[in-house]
Amino acid sequence: MESFDTYQTPLSSRYASKEMAHLFSPANRFHTWRKLWLNLAIAEKELGLPVSDEAIEQMKANLHLDAKQFEIAAVEEKKRRHDVMAHVHTFGQVAPAAAGIIHLGATSCYVTDNADLIFLREALTLLLQKLAIVIDRFAAFAEQYRDLPTLGFTHFQPAQLTTVGKRATLWLQELLWDLRNIKRARDDLGFRGVKGTTGTQASFLALFDGDHDKVEELDRRVTTLSGFSYAYPVTSQTYSRKIDVDVLAPLASFGATAHKLATDLRLLANLKEVEEPFESTQIGSSAMAYKRNPMRSERICSLARHLMILQQNALNTASVQWFERTLDDSANRRITLPEAFLTADIVLTTLQNVSEGLVVYPKVIARRISQELPFMATENIIMAIVKAGGDRQEAHEKIR
């Protein structure tokens, strides 16, 4: 019953995939922090700092938190008012040989920012996989109906003929652009690395007695251990919040694509030409039993609007970071980043469901074409008049 007594975001409790919801979960976050502390300790040991083999082994054996450790961390955070230090002490309790070297030389953003970059990259990869499936499904739909004529609409008024498949290629082209842009954002992501409290690596220079080469090697080794090919050469205490802007931009753009596509499907459903899947037991309206509402497409539009506005949070946050950093980014990013990916994930899952069950009604489409055919023929009449030596403007005016 406890879950019914407190607010839960529908993004994770109702809609999002387990994979995406887990990626941004506390369990995965703090597990990732511990891996980052382990990577730092391994690299520091390799470069000559006093880190014992036992410390490394104990850290490796305790990368996952159990329920008791979560409780201890909550008590520690309440006492210390600092989430990172709460987890430093909690980790030290289960890895006592490492208690004195966990987080050695690091600042909080070593774990928080590097973990975020790991999550962003993994989340973008999940989205790319789902987007590729959606593209494949709509490509199959476009191929299947490439030759089925349908009435085109400009200004949502009858226009020249197109085909059902050709219309779908308009959606496909934008989805392919989204795939390219999301992939670029993922591939461009670097690692914050070990940069110290203001990006000068001062604490690590002190640890290595001013040996700059060793500090640079530490940065390289931790970056490699954490699965990145490069670290940003310059940071402040944080990685630049412009990176969040660049990551959310293609997601917002995808939101626009999804909204346009789903809106087209909603309009086509009204015309009775194309419908999204509708289960035999599905109820469209509690009052009007005959209703077949395009609720999946409506959900896509609803969530896509939310997705599109989230980049504004990232823009505002990046613009107000003072000098080496301010903490007014923290609460906003804790909400904005997970919500952006959970929302995009849900939109893609719903799009896939829609794309795999679209129903086309050729007879309805043909009937609408026949109703508009006399009007559409006027353009051909104008061209025939001009070919025979007539005046195009005169013919246009007479037909109008």
Image (tube, helix red, strand yellow):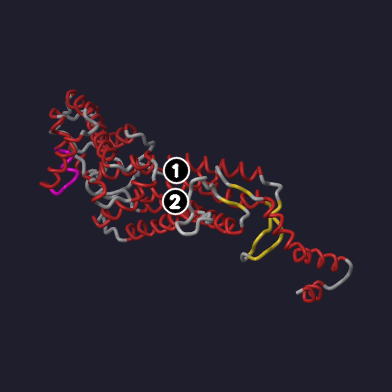
Residue 173 visible in this rendered orientation of the protein: yes
In which quadrant is the C terminus drawn? bottom right
Give the x, y percent position of residue 130. 48, 41
Q: Earlier in the sequence, mark 1 or mark 2?
A: 1
Q: Assess whether mark 2 and mark 1 are in contact (beta carbons under 8 angstroms).
A: yes
Q: What are the residue bounds of the magenta stretch?
A: 81-89
In the image, 166 versus 238, the foreground residue is 166
Classified by dominant secondary structure, the portion drawn in magenta counts as helix
Residue 40 coordinates in the image, percent (x, y): 24, 34
> In the rendered image of this protein, does residue 380 appear above or below residue 133?
below
Q: Residues within 10 Å of mark 2 (few under 14, many from 20)?
A: many
Identify the mark at residue 112; answer none if there is no mark: none
Judging by the rendered image, the residue that carries numbered circle 1 is 127
Q: What is the x, y in percent for residue 157?
A: 65, 66
Given the current orientation, which residue lies at the most extreme left position? 79
Residue under the image location 28 percent in, 40 percent down:
29
Local SS, label 1: helix
The residue indicated by pointer 2 is 251
Real-space Cα separation, disc 1 to disc 2, in angstroms? 9 Å
Report the front residue among 165 and 267.
Answer: 267
**Location of residue 133 with respect to 269 vertically, above or below:** above
Query: Is 318 left, or right, of 96 in this rendering?
Result: right
Does residue 79 appear to the left or right of 198 in the view shown?
Answer: left
Residue at 19% x, 43% y: name it: 84
Q: Amino acid at mark 2?
A: Leu
> Residue visible at 55% across and 51% down?
174
The image position of residue 340, as x and y in percent, is 38, 51
Q: Quadrant of residue 190?
A: top left
Front residue (pair 55, 218): 55
Tell me which amino acid carries mark 1.
Leu
* Residue 180 visible to an observer of this rendering: no
Picture quarter with the N terminus: top left
